[in-house]
């Protein structure tokens, strides 16, 4: 509920601060006084599009701020918490919109924290709903009729559950279509993948095989040289070279090092300070034995298989050909291709079986949708009959006693639809029904779509009748009506006041009206006036006392200057409204 509204430098409003009652608040004023500006300001708190022209001439920015109580909307608290907007006072929330004149940009805030326009729309839309003269156009839009009926029938949650089932069957059907369209391509792909898997499997690939083979090939290509070099190392280390192989024989490194050790041992007896050097020499001798053993072991392992080099060359050529054919860098990538192809092949082999499973799943979902859609349609039909009776009665109250209103539910056959009562019917996420409101305003006229029949006055009254009936299921706490009484007058105007006041039993209502009969029902009455101050036009809004209300209603009845007769009529109008409200409250 809107507790307080503050407007500054907005259009021709300098500064206004209003405090509203929780019931029926009316705002009246002459044409051009600025009543529509109030609607624009409230629209800013709902996240509607701003306009630089909203900034008062000579000001840098316009500001609109609304303080709301959340006592009637505790469901908003989790949303505020989700956006980190919960404050110390969980009972109230402050919505603010600033519009900068230079840039045209606007800044939205909730509880003092900047938020996006989308967040403001989500929160503000749950707190305030504005219904204007143009809202009657929504009655002409067939797509809104289903939403209105479902809200009245209390089946919105059931429709959402049905919608989830329809989304599921749409996904299943999409998969089936994709798989069936790909059937021819699937067969070709299976052949292609089967050949690839067989060829790469038969190749018996090993990751890193090229590196190993390349190293082995290098050894084989240099086998004679390697053998000679190893033999030379061993002779130098261990045996030395006999005189028959050289002009003079050479001793091995081992023999030479042994001679060094023997001499050093003799020296040690003469000079004990050589003990450390002697130890180092002995250690070198022992390590030399390890080196000799390593060379000998390597020499013994050197076995070069005849024909092995040719085998390696053939294998490397095979790997190069496969890599080029399948656009791979090496055996590791070829193995990855093999794995992926095997998995895809398994999926393709499974697709026929998968289609059968999906078809079965589709049938199960369609059966479930059929049951839910039939139940939803039945409840809609029952609620539609009841709604039609209540709207006809409300229209009779609004001086249209001969109106016939009908909620038409129709279905369309579809071979791919759901089976209900031995008929296959088309369906979508809202069910099987095409819902349209029909109207016959005069006796003897057939029922026709609203857009083809309803006049401006009729549509305004129909909108009011709908709102008065649907208000009980409307969760938005504050409803704003902007001259929805257009085209209405006389006794019907009094009934409009009754209807709007009745809505305020479940909602806070703010109503801008030009009818004194409606204004008389206000629990709080604000007058909107335009004045010139210091050669600047300004709009002022102030609450009226009881005597001021009489003057305002009298002026609305007969214009100014106000006559005593119009004052008496205004007083009688207020008294009649008060008596109706008292009688209704006590009943």
Image (tube, grey):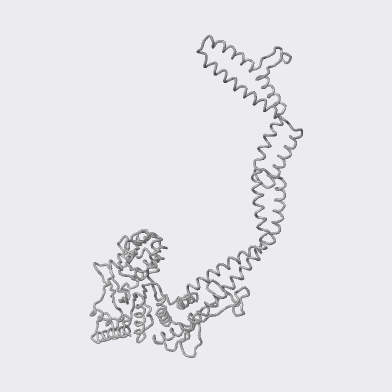
Q: Quadrant of residue 323?
A: top right
Q: Please tell me in which quadrant of the rendered image residue 176 appears.
A: bottom right
> For the view shown, which residue lies furthest in the bottom direction?
444
**Residue that extends furthest to the top in the rendered view of this protein:** 270
When the figure is inspected, residue 322 is found, relative to residue 309, above or below; the finding is below
Task: Choose between 254 and 206: the one closer to the eye.
Answer: 254
Q: How many marks?
A: 0
Residue 457 position, x and y percent, is: 41, 82
Image x and y of residue 375, in percent: 53, 78
Along the line of sight, the residue nearer the viewer: 88 or 241: 241
Q: Quadrant of residue 22?
A: bottom left
At a point 50% along the width and 85% down the height, the residue shown is 447
User: Which of the two residues, 9 or 209, is positioned nearer the viewer here?
Assistant: 209
Question: Residue 301's x, y, as percent?
Answer: 70, 30
Name the quarter where the N terminus is drawn: bottom left
Q: Is residue 308 left or right of residue 340?
A: right
Residue drawn where x is 34% and y is 86% of the image: 490
- The quadrant of the picture occupied by the C terminus is bottom left
Answer with left or right where residue 375 lies relative to residue 76: right
The front one of 326 and 269 is 269
Extreme residue toward the front, this view: 269
Residue 263's place in the image compared with 298, above or below, is: above
Q: Is residue 364 left or right of residue 12?
A: right
| Place of residue 567 in the rendered image (x, y in percent of width and height, measured from the top left) | 25, 84
- Image: 235 above or below 570: above
């Amino acid at each position: 509920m809107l507790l307080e509204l503050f407007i500054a430098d907005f259009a021709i409003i300098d500064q206004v601060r209003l405090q509203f009652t929780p019931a029926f608040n009316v705002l009246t004023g002459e044409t051009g006084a600025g009543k529509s500006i109030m609607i624009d300001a409230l629209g800013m708190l709902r996240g509607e599009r701003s306009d630089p022209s909203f900034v008062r001439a000579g000001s840098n920015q316009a500001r609109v701020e609304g303080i709301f109580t959340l006592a009637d909307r505790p469901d908003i608290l989790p949303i505020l918490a989700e956006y980190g907007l919960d404050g110390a006072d969980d009972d109230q929330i402050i919505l603010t919109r600033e519009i900068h004149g230079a840039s045209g940009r606007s800044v939205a805030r909730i509880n003092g924290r900047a938020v996006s326009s989308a967040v403001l729309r989500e929160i503000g839309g749950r707190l305030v709903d504005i219904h204007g003269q143009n809202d009657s156009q929504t009655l002409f839009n067939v797509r809104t009729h289903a939403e209105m009926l479902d809200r009245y029938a209390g089946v919105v949650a059931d429709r959402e559950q049905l919608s989830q089932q329809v989304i599921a069957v749409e996904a299943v059907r999409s998969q089936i279509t994709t798989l069936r369209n790909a059937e021819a391509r699937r067969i070709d792909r299976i052949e292609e993948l089967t050949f690839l898997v067989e060829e790469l499997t038969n190749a018996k690939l090993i990751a890193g095989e090229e590196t190993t083979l390349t190293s082995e090939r290098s050894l084989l290509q240099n086998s004679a040289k390697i053998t000679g070099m190893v033999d030379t190392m061993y002779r130098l280390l261990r045996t030395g070279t006999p005189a028959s192989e050289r002009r003079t024989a050479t001793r091995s490194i081992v023999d030479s090092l042994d001679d060094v050790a023997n001499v050093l041992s003799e020296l040690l007896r003469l000079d004990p300070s050589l003990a450390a050097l002697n130890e180092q020499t002995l250690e070198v001798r022992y390590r030399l034995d390890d080196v000799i053993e390593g060379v000998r072991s390597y020499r013994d392992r050197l076995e070069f298989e005849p024909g092995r080099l040719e085998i390696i060359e053939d294998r490397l050529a095979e790997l190069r050909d496969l890599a080029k054919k399948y656009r791979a860098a090496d055996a590791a990538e070829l193995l990855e291709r093999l794995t992926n192809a095997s998995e895809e092949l398994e999926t393709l082999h499974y697709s026929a079986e998968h289609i059968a499973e999906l078809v079965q799943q589709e049938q199960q979902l369609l059966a479930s949708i059929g049951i839910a859609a039939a139940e939803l349609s039945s409840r809609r039909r029952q609620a539609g009959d009841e709604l039609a009776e209540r709207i006809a009665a409300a229209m009779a109250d609004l001086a249209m006693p001969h109106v016939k209103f009908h909620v038409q539910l129709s279905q369309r056959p579809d071979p791919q639809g759901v089976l209900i009562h031995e008929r296959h019917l088309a369906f979508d996420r809202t069910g099987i029904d095409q819902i349209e409101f029909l109207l016959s305003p005069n006796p003897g006229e057939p029922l026709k779509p609203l857009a083809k029949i309803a006049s401006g006055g009729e549509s305004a009254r129909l909108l009011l009748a709908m709102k008065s009936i649907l208000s009980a299921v409307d969760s938005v706490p504050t409803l704003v009506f902007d001259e929805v009484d257009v085209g209405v007058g006389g006794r019907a105007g009094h009934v409009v006041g009754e209807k709007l006041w009745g809505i305020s039993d479940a909602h806070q209502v703010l109503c801008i009206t030009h009818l004194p009969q409606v204004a008389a029902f206000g629990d709080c009455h604000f007058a909107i006036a335009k004045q010139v101050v210091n050669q600047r036009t300004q709009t002022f809004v102030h609450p009226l006392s009881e005597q001021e209300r009489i003057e305002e209603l009298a002026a609305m009845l007969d214009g100014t200057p106000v006559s005593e007769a119009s004052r008496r009529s205004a007083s009688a109008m207020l008294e009649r409204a008060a008596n109706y409200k008292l009688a209704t409250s006590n009943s």
